[in-house]
């Protein structure tokens, strides 16, 4: 939604703010559709913006620099978004920053203090947050419904949609099929009564894109170093303060 007011583009409502915070349905936290991509990256091609392909995975995760990228310093901001101004690189503008953390200064919005770190990580169990296993599901989702939503043993309807109301929350006044992927087949892929493979990714290639391979598993920090990179000890918290 590149030509929509930032409030609309980033879905500036309570539901979207909660999407980044704990205790919110996974659908609000991880809706990957073209319109949402554009809302996050209005001036970037979709494939480059937020479509999880190998290049993007490598850009965000598959190197040591990305560890520092989540440490949120200027150099690594440039790593995440080369050739982009820092404000644009991580937030695009002050309004986007406010979308994440209303009434919080930009420095705080980028998690440069312990409180913000805790807001995004909450507790030491974040070690499990990016680990692709049941424990991680419980940590990242914080409730049974989200655990089921993220587990590939639950229908994708619960994972990305849960119900029609959730769709409307992301794309008010838009038909469901348009809100999800702009066609009926993909809507059905996200809705109940669809095989898990189809529901979660639609095909094996997309499954691999969303991290059903070793590289992407590593990209989401399946080692202690990455865990430490996300500031999972008091020393790193102190450094951020």
Image (spheres, rainbow, N blue to C red):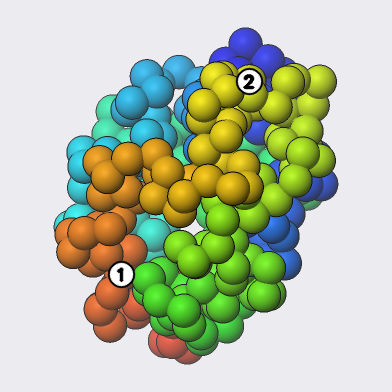
Badge 1: how crowded within 10 Å, few (<14), some, or many (20+)? many
The residues bearing labels 2 and 1 have C-alpha atoms spaced at a distance of 33 Å
Q: Earlier in the sequence, mark 2 or mark 1?
A: 2
Secondary structure beneath dot 1 equals loop
Task: Please identify the quadrant where the N terminus is shown.
Answer: top right
Q: Kindly identify which numbered label has been placed on residue 221.
A: 1
Identity of the residue drawn at 37% across and 19% down: 45
* Spot occupied by residue 225 in the image (x, y as percentages of width and height): 25, 78
Query: 179 or 107: which is nearer to us?
Result: 179
Q: Looking at the image, is 115 positioned above or below residue 233? A: above
Badge nearest the viewer, 2 or 1: 2
Residue 143 is left or right of residue 121, and the answer is right
Circles 2 and 1, Cβ within 8 Å, touching? The answer is: no
* Spot occupied by residue 207 in the image (x, y as percentages of width and height): 32, 48
Q: Looking at the image, is 181 positioned above or below residue 204? A: above
Badge 2: how crowded within 10 Å, few (<14), some, or many (20+)? some
Say which residue label 2 marks.
178
Identity of the residue drawn at 63% across and 20% down: 178
* Spot occupied by residue 19 in the image (x, y as percentages of width and height): 67, 52
């Amino acid at each position: 939604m590149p030509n929509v007011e930032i409030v609309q583009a980033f879905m500036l409502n309570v539901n979207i703010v909660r999407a980044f915070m704990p205790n919110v349905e996974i659908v609000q936290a991880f809706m990957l559709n073209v319109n949402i991509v554009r809302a996050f990256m209005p001036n970037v091609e979709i494939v480059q913006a937020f479509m999880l392909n190998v290049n993007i995975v490598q850009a965000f995760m598959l190197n040591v620099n990305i560890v520092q990228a989540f440490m949120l310093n200027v150099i690594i901001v440039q790593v995440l978004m080369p050739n982009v101004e820092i404000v644009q690189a991580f937030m695009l503008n002050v309004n986007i920053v406010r979308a994440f953390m209303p009434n919080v200064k930009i420095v705080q919005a980028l998690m440069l203090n312990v409180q913000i770190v805790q807001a995004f990580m909450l507790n030491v169990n974040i070690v499990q947050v990016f680990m692709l296993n049941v424990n991680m599901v419980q940590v990242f989702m914080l409730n049974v419904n989200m655990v089921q939503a993220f587990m590939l043993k639950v229908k994708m309807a619960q994972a990305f949609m849960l119900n029609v109301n959730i769709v409307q929350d992301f794309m008010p006044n838009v038909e469901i099929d348009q809100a999800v992927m702009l066609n009926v087949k993909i809507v059905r892929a996200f809705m109940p009564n669809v095989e898990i493979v189809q529901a979660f990714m639609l095909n094996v290639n997309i499954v691999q894109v969303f991290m059903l391979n070793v590289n992407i598993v590593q990209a989401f920090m399946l080692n202690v170093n990455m865990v430490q990179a996300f500031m999972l000890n008091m020393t790193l918290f102190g450094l951020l303060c």
